[in-house]
Image (tube, grey):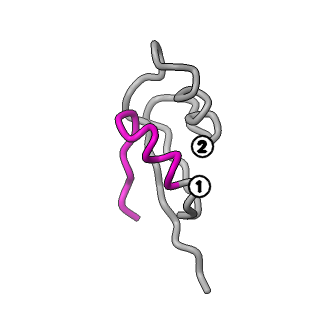
Amino acid sequence: MKMEKIKIKQVRSRIGRPKDQKRTLDALGLTKMNKVVEHNATPQILGMVHKIKHLITVVEN
């Protein structure tokens, strides 16, 4: 069984954001603007994506 992948791109700055949102960006590996990372679409990752949905976009594969 193949795990579905999700590509996430940071499109808004982390400056002035609450500490928990910065920690979530770090956990996903997003350290700079316009950086794209790829993760497996697990419930944990999807929850993190939902928490910072205003700072990121999901890139089509």
Point out the stretch of residues depicted in magenta.
46-61
The 10 Å Cα crowd at callout 1, few under 14, some 14 to 19, many 20 or more, is few
Answer above or below: position of 40 versus 35: below
> In the image, residue 47 lies at what x, y percent?
51, 51
Q: What residue did someone put label 1 on?
A: 44
Q: Secondary structure at mark 1?
A: helix
In this orientation, which residue lies closer to the viewer: 4 or 52?
Answer: 52
Tell which of 44 and 39 is nearer to you. 44
Q: CA distance from mark 1 to mark 2?
A: 11 Å
Give the label, 1 or 2, closer to the camera: 1
Q: In the drawing, does residue 45 fall left or right of residue 13?
A: right
Q: Earlier in the sequence, mark 1 or mark 2?
A: 2
Q: Give me the residue at 38% from left, 28% from top.
A: 12
Residue 51 percent coordinates (x, y): 46, 40
Q: Which residue is mark 2?
A: 28
Q: In which quadrant of the rendered image does the C terminus lie?
A: bottom left
> Front-most of 35 and 39?
39
Q: Secondary structure at mark 2?
A: helix
